[in-house]
Amino acid sequence: MRPDLSVHVGDTELATPLVAASGTVGSAWELAKAADVTAYGALIAKSVSSEEWPGRPPPRLAPVGVGMLNGIGIQNPGIERWQRESGPRILRVAAPVWGSAVGRAPEEYARVASGLEASGVAAIELNLSCPNLEDGRMFALDPLRSGEVVAAATAAVTLPVGAKLSPNSEDIVAVARTCAESGAAWLTLTNTAWGAGIDVESRRPLLSGEVGGYSGPPLKPIALRCVIEVARALPHVPIIGCGGVMKGVDVIEYLMAGASAVEIGTIHFAEPRAGHRILAEVSAWCDAHNIPAVADLVGAMEPW
């Protein structure tokens, strides 16, 4: 008998525990043109800002062993153009599409969130791993600033709003707590870690911006640690795990750590149709271990 693959992230029900991570599937409708997206409980479109952002100049992507560096600079057309061009298309995607908002100030996040809601997205994830203009630090490194963004965005919309935090945070539990108290319906743990690389032949950095986001399999132990810490400190707050998922057992680990759902990201660059394979592996694992519902695994890690 096939296990029940549905999960709940707070009040939001997902048909499967898999969520396609923002920045790896375009605006969701692009992936839907190339792959069957029904393996996903939701797909999160690439982050959108209030006004157009040109992003960084190339090179912006670089392989580093089994991981990847990216320094895209969140290139996007701005919310008004995104509404016109992607809004009508996301309504035809065969899985729920969530929006991702980014900005340099709380009021910008609020404006983008409002535009995303008007476009028909089912929920909104706030990308708090974006440097703000005042001092170049990420919102996600500061509990107070993170809370201000969450409060502004949740006040601007009626949709569920989640916050995507950074593994670079000095105290991720403090940031998570403030976001939850400010109205976040869930927390995504985590985004990329800071990383860099050098081409020894040219002696130049692998990325034009020198430092970028490091993702891929090596990120998983770091993100899992964040999930475990936040789930233990804030057991009532829904969590979406994210970082380094390549196989079904990776999803199982995140669920056991305390995540209610799991985002998959970097694998899409090498395997755009990875969702169905990973979901099949999750289902097979549950079947082999007599787990009737994947939701039964949430927080199932046993202490020594």
Image (cartoon, helix red, strand yellow):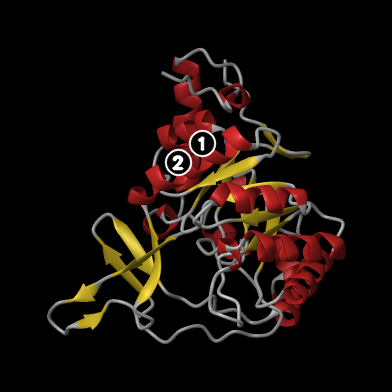
Q: Position of residue 280 (x, y in %)?
A: 48, 32
- Type of amino acid at the residue the image marks with label 2: Arg
Q: Position of residue 94 (x, y in %)?
A: 68, 50
The answer to whether one can see residue 17 in this image is no
Report whether 282 appears left or right of 180. Answer: left
Q: Are marks 2 and 1 in contact (CB under 8 Å)?
A: yes
- Near mark 1 (Cα within 10 A), the count class, few <14, some 14-19 or many ≥20, is many
For label 2, the SS is helix
Q: At 72% from the left edge and 77% from the top edge, which residue is drawn?
A: 79
Q: Residues within 10 Å of mark 2 (few under 14, many from 20)?
A: some
| Residue depicted at x 49% and y 36% | 254
Residue, disc 1: 228
Q: How many marks?
A: 2
**Nearest the camera: 209 or 174?**
174
The tag on residue 225 is 2
Q: Is residue 179 above or below residue 260?
A: below
Q: Which quadrant of the figure contains the N terminus?
A: top right
Please name the residue shown 52% across and 59% down the image: 34
Image quadrant for the C terminus?
top left
At label 1, the amino acid type is: Ile
- Residue 110, numbered label: none
Residue 146, quarter of picture:
bottom right
Towards the viewer: 190 or 46: 190
Residue at 69 percent of width and 57 percent of height:
98
* Between 1 and 173, the one nearer to me in the picture: 173
Label 1 secondary element: helix
